[in-house]
Image (cartoon, grey):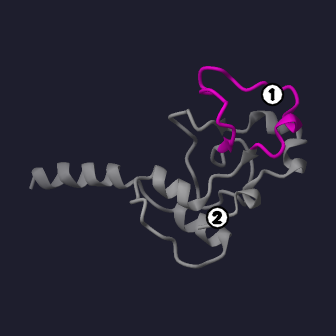
Amino acid sequence: ESGDKEGLVVPESVLAKQWAKGLSIVSPADRSSFCFTGHYGKVIHKASGSLLLDDESAGRLALEPLDRTNMLDYFGKIRFFSPKEVLNMLGFPRAYKMPDMPLKNQYKAVGNSVSVPVCTALLSHLMDRV
């Protein structure tokens, strides 16, 4: 896991792009996000996975949308989720540790993962039918 959250900040050059207004941005209070693919952190566009507005004072963006007039106002406050955070959202145990590998490889592995609670429920349902 990358413990360095500063290394996860979305670059200013990305926020300066006109299309940055269409990125999926969520707050810690939100309860949904875009899916995380194996290209998360590598390819940035509006469907490449949600970004986090790392601001505890932000409310639920689903209820109070972000003012997207000037995305550069949020430089330093919008970042990628860490691979560990994505795994936690997918239901992996908090104690689970990623192998020591480059960040891009961690995102690739995490993006190709599955939701543990969903798989558990599906397998349970299927086993009940056997």
Q: Quadrant of the C terminus?
A: bottom left
Which SS class for mark 1?
loop
Amino acid tagged 1: Arg
For image coordinates 87% across by 35% down, the residue present is 73
Left/right of residue 58 with respect to residue 87 in the rendered view: right
- At x 57% / y 52%, what residue is drawn? 36
Q: From this view, report whether residue 108 is shown above or below residue 82.
A: below
Q: Which mark is residue 3?
A: 2
**Magenta stretch: helix, strand or loop mostly:** loop
Q: Range of the magenta residues?
A: 51-77
Q: Are marks 1 and 2 in contact (CB under 8 Å)?
A: no
Is residue 111 toward the left or the right of residue 94 in the image?
Answer: right
The reply, left or right, for residue 111 in relation to residue 25 is left
Using the rendered image of the protein, determine whether residue 111 is visible from the camera's viewpoint.
no
Residue 41's x, y, as percent? 70, 58
The local crowd at label 2, few if under 14, some if 14 to 19, many if 20 or more residues have their Cα within 10 Å, is few
Q: Which residue is mark 1?
A: 68
In 3D space, how far apart are the residues under numbered discs 1 and 2 (Cα atoms)? 29 Å
Q: Residue at x 56, y 39 (%)?
A: 33
Within the magenta stretch, is there residue 56?
yes
Q: Quadrant of the N terminus?
A: bottom right
